[in-house]
Amino acid sequence: MRIIFAGTPEFAAAALATLIKAGHEVALVLTQPDRPAGRGMKLAASPVKQLARRHGLTVLQPSTLKDAEVQAQLAAVNAEAMVVAAYGLLLPPAVLAIPRFGCLNIHASLLPRWRGAAPIQRALLAGDPETGITIMQMDPGLDTGAMLMRLPLPIADNDTAQTLHDKLAAQGASAIVSALQQLDRGLLTAEPQDERDATYAAKLSKAEGLIDWHKSAAELARAVRAFNPFPVAQARFGGEIWRVWQARTVNRNDGRPGEILQADKDGILVACGEGALRLTEVQKAGGKRLPAASFLAGNPVKPGDRFDA
């Protein structure tokens, strides 16, 4: 099929790579404008742009799709479908109407649950037992279009936002290839979303990463997994910021919230509002991510010490 592809991060690049491998004709690639990145804040191309350039594909980086000239460029491509994955720009009705088969979105949740920017992290935070991929026929709303395909994926107890992202990126890439094949044969039926089941996955903020020890250990353990690798769960100790990369719950209910109950090779055990949390991989500002045993060698703490409120 002759397609336009619109996407920006690694999640989208996985889909583009699979579409290319499957033999689809990618006539045009849309991606976000280059952004400053890294310590030097130099302009950097998105993962999708980097991949497109390696394959010699035409890349367009508009700041909006509302511009009539941009819309004319899209129409001139004469694509049968547009595939959209974590693109970052809204598609106005005029663009949605351009391809013969419309615009198909690869969304990293089982819609209508977790519409919006951070479905992977919100599913982890909520303690959902499963998530998945939805291939959706896009409409002008925010992830409100009819569903063409839903593929569930169990969430493992040790999944982080990164591991779940990687699983869903692979699943989404496979799903869109299958969806395009079935669409071309008239085998897909669009199913409207049930608005009663809709939830919203708001964009993550750095402030959400700050640990509140009055919450339950189970809730905090989910937050540590959901905020790995961004924005990373953080705790204040002695006026310094510690980043918590890995942690697990312990069934223990003594101590005040934020009080260190144990500090040894197994980790740093901290009392919570309910239960306790064992920190097993920690990082100080400017330092490296370290297993707890290595971290404690350079940052000695003892039972009775307490994290800052």
Image: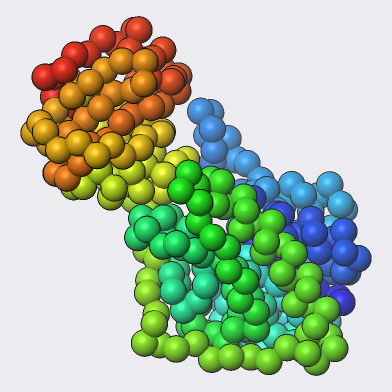
- Quadrant in which residue 115 is drawn: bottom left
Q: Quadrant of the N terminus?
A: bottom right
* Nearest to the observer: residue 4 or residue 270: 270
Q: In this image, 302 relative to 108: left or right?
A: left
Q: Is residue 256 above or below residue 240?
A: below
Q: Quadrant of the C terminus?
A: top left
Q: Which residue is drawn at the image coordinates 54% and 41% (left, top)? A: 36
Task: Report whether residue 30 is seen.
Answer: no
Q: Is residue 64 above or below residue 20?
A: below
Q: In this image, 45 relative to 26: left or right?
A: left
* Nearest to the observer: residue 23 or residue 293: 293
Q: Which residue is drawn at the image coordinates 26% and 17% (left, top)? A: 263
Q: In this image, 155 relative to 218: left or right?
A: right
Q: Which residue is drawn at the image coordinates 87% and 69% (left, top)? A: 24
- Quadrant in which residue 30 is drawn: bottom right
Task: Report whether residue 52 is seen.
Answer: yes
Q: Which residue is drawn at the image coordinates 15% and 38% (left, top)? A: 253
Q: Is residue 195 above or below residue 222?
A: below
Residue 8, percent across and down?
Answer: 63, 56
Q: Is residue 229 above or below residue 46?
A: above
* Nearest to the observer: residue 11 or residue 161: 161
* Nearest to the observer: residue 41 or residue 155: 155
Residue extending furthest toward the left: 256
Residue 16, percent across and down?
Answer: 76, 60
Q: How is the image coloured?
A: rainbow
Q: In this image, 156 relative to 85: left or right?
A: left
Residue 100, percent across and down?
Answer: 77, 89
Residue 80, percent across and down?
Answer: 81, 82
